[in-house]
């Protein structure tokens, strides 16, 4: 092993140690693997002291597409926005690990917060009628059964509001959304699939945690 990669190894272990203390659902070894995968995805080795922005929107979206079969642009942008907590247009290493902690292993509470952020397209803390309309239209577009699909979607928005808008102000606050999902868990992904199913999630974990171990 060269001196350089030994140094990287040490750096990654130190970093993993720190991050694993702050991330809910990964242990130190898992964080180490996630850092390695992040570096592979970045396409360049970690160099101490060198500023790294992180995964840009395009790279991040191709991961969602290739590993999790996501195709919906609006949802993929929402997932990107939710991972990119500091809103700098890049998912950095820490955001990657914190995001995956919820994405792959989150509790219901964490997933409710996550989905709400994905669906709140303009980040104003409410899911508006317009946002619901766009997302439902987007996710239903492959089923052209109605003569005027927009009318059908508007009806669906009203039905959804009736079910979820507990304080009747015509939009969903976080507490409306949270209450509705607690009563009926299926509403978690009411506006589009933004979490991986068990099979994809397991395959991704296997790819990160086992295949690397076998190398
Ligand atoms: Ca960021
Ligand atoms: Ca909003």
Image (cartoon, rainbow, N blue to C red):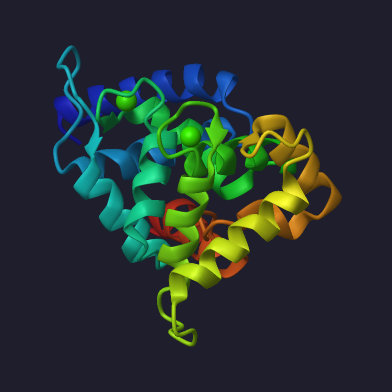
Residue at image point 52% right, 36% down: 117
The answer to whether 176 appears left or right of 146 in the picture is right
Could you say which is closer to the camera, residue 31 or residue 54?
Answer: 54
The image shows residue 51 at horizontal and vertical percentages of: 16, 17
The residue furthest top is 49
The answer to whether 41 appears left or right of 23 in the picture is left
Asked whether residue 12 appears in the rendered view, the answer is yes
The image shows residue 86, relative to residue 62, as above or below, that is above
| Count of all numbered marks drawn on residues in the image | 0
- Quadrant in which residue 52 is drawn: top left
Q: Quadrant of the C terminus?
A: bottom left
The image shows residue 135, relative to residue 99, as above or below, that is below
The image shows residue 135 at horizontal and vertical percentages of: 46, 56
The answer to whether 113 appears left or right of 42 in the picture is right
Q: Splitting the image into four quadrants, where does ligand 1 fall?
A: top left
Q: Quadrant of the N terminus?
A: top left
Residue at image point 36% right, 35% down: 35
Asked whether residue 197 appears in the rendered view, the answer is no
Residue at image point 16% right, 22% down: 47
Could you say which is closer to the camera, residue 62 or residue 48?
Answer: 62
The image shows residue 140 at horizontal and vertical percentages of: 47, 72
- Quadrant in which residue 78 is drawn: top left
- Quadrant in which residue 24 is drawn: top right
Residue at image point 32% right, 57% down: 73
The image shows residue 143 at horizontal and vertical percentages of: 46, 83
The answer to whether 16 appears left or right of 56 in the picture is right
The image shows residue 81, relative to residue 203, as above or below, that is above
The residue furthest right is 183
């Amino acid at each position: 092993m060269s001196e350089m990669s030994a140094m990287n190894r040490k750096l990654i272990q130190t970093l993993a140690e720190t991050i694993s203390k702050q991330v809910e659902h990964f242990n130190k070894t898992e964080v180490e693997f996630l850092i390695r995968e992040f570096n592979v995805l970045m396409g360049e080795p970690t160099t101490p002291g060198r500023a790294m922005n992180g995964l840009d929107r395009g790279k991040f979206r191709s991961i969602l597409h290739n590993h999790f079969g996501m195709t919906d642009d609006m949802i993929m942008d929402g997932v990107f926005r939710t991972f990119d907590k500091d809103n700098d247009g890049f998912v950095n290493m820490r955001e990657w690990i914190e995001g995956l902690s919820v994405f792959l292993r989150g509790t219901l509470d964490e997933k409710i917060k996550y989905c709400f952020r994905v669906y709140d397209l303009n980040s104003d803390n409410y899911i508006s009628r317009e946002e619901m309309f766009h997302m439902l239209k987007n996710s239903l577009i492959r089923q052209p059964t109605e003569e005027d699909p927009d009318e059908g979607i508007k009806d669906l928005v009203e039905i959804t509001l009736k079910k979820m808008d507990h304080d009747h102000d015509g939009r969903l606050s976080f507490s409306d959304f949270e209450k509705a999902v607690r009563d009926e868990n299926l509403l978690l992904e009411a506006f589009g699939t933004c979490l991986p199913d068990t099979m994809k999630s397991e395959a991704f974990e296997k790819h990160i945690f086992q295949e690397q171990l076998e190398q």
